[in-house]
Image (cartoon, helix red, strand yellow):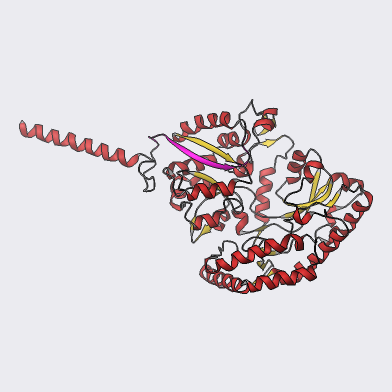
């Protein structure tokens, strides 16, 4: 009997140890959360989330509803902080550098810059997490989003499913289009605008700005800029190209012709006299403008008109193109310091696949912030405008969001067609590592900031100032940067074959 009791005791002890070990291995969020802790949601976790956009009065009320739902789905709650547009990048750099334990943050090609911060180690590699907990994301996304945002074969953020192609348009105040019976379909280039700008200048009061642009304006030329259009190294976008060469865009005939045109427009009074120092322009708010330019998406005219309170129409400057930067235009990264990466990915998967949650984020609470007109169509209530104006493009899968009653029923089908029609730029997926030339890049960027606002807006004579800018940039090592970019690109392209 004693032997049997001993065997029973040993068996019970082994079961207990086995259960204990299994429990330790299954609690997501235990330890540092990075060792593949399993997909158990037994332990509730709180995810710290940073999003871009102005603080919203009703966010605590909406967050309470979000947390009820997310807790039920994955046993997690959110602590959401909104950081205003102009402060976001700087604040996030400080938080990230300090090693703060947050979980998810908005990142992009233009705010809390994705590639720079991934290279710094601020973001966690997500490939394994996507495979295990983000299967819905991978099913929803156009594969070019994930392909174009890889860095050395790894994804460090989840792109928002939205327009993938980038297309600039001329955007017009319809009031003047109608008054002067202008056929905007005939306008594509900067030069095409001339007779219409002249009409507005001669026929309207002095306070109506014919071409309403700020100091960041740059004439469109068909080139792919590897460090953004603030840096003068780019590759021409052309069909059936076989010669993939980076050039100094300040030396291209396309830019030189455009600069002569914009100089003529400035001298004629078509732009504001203070354009070279104008950080932004409030033309949409005042309505005192004829034409500006903007990046579009399907049915953007309806959204712009709704926001402005008057009719805005547009016409394309170029066909849509998929750039590496446009694929990373809106993303969510998991912090390298996150203690709960598995649950963070579960949440991102939910946000990008669950219609109720996605619309709760974007439009708030039904009956409080909006009312349903039909199953998929809503109408804003005053509380939405007054207390919950969230940036929808920065919140997750756009294709899940409700339509407003004035929007066309085929809006999201149009987005898919738009993305399918976009051609891919020659450098799509290429990531320029600036480390070998970081000193030169910093110096050239500073020179561009010095010269670009005046030159690109026509405020100064390009024949006088463009050579000065180019001389300074060459002295700072522009040719070295071009050579390094070309070397890296040629190696990348060869490895792709």
The question of residue 197 being in magenta is answered with no
Along the viewing direction, whichever of 254 and 418 lies nearer the viewer: 254
Q: Position of residue 388 (x, y in %)?
A: 64, 33
Q: Residue at x 49, y 34 (%)?
A: 70
Residue 419 seen from this side: yes
* Number of numbered markers: 0
45 in magenta: yes
Q: Residue at x 69, y 31 (%)?
A: 380
Where is residue 51? Give x, y as percent: 57, 42
Viewed as shown, does residue 393 lie left or right of 15? right
Magenta residue span:
41-56
Q: Position of residue 283 (x, y in %)?
A: 79, 46
Residue 67 coordinates in the image, percent (x, y):
50, 31
Image quarter of residue 320: bottom right
Residue 366's place in the image compared with 212, above or below, is above
Which corner quadrant holds the N terminus? top left
Q: Is residue 252 visible?
A: no
Task: Name the residue nearer the viewer: 362 or 238.
Answer: 362
Relative to 468, residue 207 above or below? above
Left or right of 155 on screen, residue 268: right
Left/right of residue 276 with respect to residue 415 in the rendered view: right
**Foreground: 392 or 53?**
53
The residue at the far top in this view is 367
Question: Which residue is situated farthest in the right direction here?
Answer: 203
Residue plotted at (69% across, 32% down) = 385
């Amino acid at each position: 009997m004693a032997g049997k009791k001993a065997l029973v005791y040993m068996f019970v002890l082994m079961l207990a140890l086995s259960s204990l070990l299994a429990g330790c291995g299954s609690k997501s969020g235990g330890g540092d959360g990075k060792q593949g802790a399993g997909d158990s949601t037994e332990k509730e976790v709180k995810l710290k989330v940073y999003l871009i956009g102005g603080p919203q009065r009703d966010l605590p009320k909406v967050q309470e509803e979000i947390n009820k739902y997310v807790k039920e789905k994955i046993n997690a709650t959110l602590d959401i902080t909104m950081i205003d547009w102009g402060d976001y990048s700087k604040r996030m750099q400080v938080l990230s550098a300090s090693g703060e334990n947050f979980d998810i943050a908005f990142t992009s090609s233009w705010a809390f810059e994705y590639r720079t911060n991934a290279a710094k180690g601020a973001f966690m590699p997500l490939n394994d997490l996507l495979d295990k907990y983000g299967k819905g994301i991978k099913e929803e996304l156009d594969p070019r989003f994930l392909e174009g945002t890889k860095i050395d074969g790894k994804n460090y953020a989840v792109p928002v499913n939205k327009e993938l192609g980038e297309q600039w348009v001329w955007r017009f105040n319809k009031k003047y289009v109608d008054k002067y019976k202008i056929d905007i379909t005939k306008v594509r280039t900067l030069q095409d605008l001339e007779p219409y700008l002249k009409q507005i200048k001669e026929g309207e009061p002095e306070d109506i700005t014919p071409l309403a642009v700020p100091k960041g304006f740059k004439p469109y030329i068909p080139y792919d800029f590897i460090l953004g259009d603030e840096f003068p190294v780019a590759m021409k976008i052309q069909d059936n190209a076989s010669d993939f060469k980076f050039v100094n865009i300040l030396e291209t005939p396309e830019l030189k012709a455009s600069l002569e045109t914009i100089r003529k427009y400035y001298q004629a009074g078509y732009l504001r006299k203070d354009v070279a120092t104008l950080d932004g322009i409030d033309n949409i708010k005042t309505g005192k403008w004829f034409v500006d330019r903007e990046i579009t998406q399907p049915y953007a005219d309806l959204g712009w008109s709704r926001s402005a309170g008057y009719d805005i129409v547009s016409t394309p400057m170029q066909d849509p193109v998929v750039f590496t930067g446009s694929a990373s235009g809106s993303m969510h990264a998991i912090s390298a310091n996150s203690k709960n990466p598995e649950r963070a990915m579960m949440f991102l998967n939910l946000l990008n696949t669950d219609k109720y949650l996605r619309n709760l984020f974007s439009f708030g609470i039904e009956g409080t912030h909006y009312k349903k007109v039909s199953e998929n169509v809503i109408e804003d209530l005053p509380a939405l405008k007054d207390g919950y104006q969230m940036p929808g493009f920065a919140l997750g899968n756009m294709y899940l969001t409700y339509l407003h009653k004035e929007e066309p029923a085929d809006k999201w089908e149009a987005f898919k067609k738009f993305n399918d029609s976009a051609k891919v730029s020659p450098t799509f997926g290429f990531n320029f590592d600036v480390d070998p030339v970081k000193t030169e890049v910093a110096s050239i960027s500073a020179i561009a900031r010095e010269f670009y606002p005046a030159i690109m807006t026509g405020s100064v004579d390009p024949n006088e100032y463009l050579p000065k800018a180019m001389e300074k940039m060459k002295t700072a090592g522009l040719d070295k940067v071009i050579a390094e970019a070309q070397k890296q690109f040629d190696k990348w392209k060869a490895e792709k074959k």
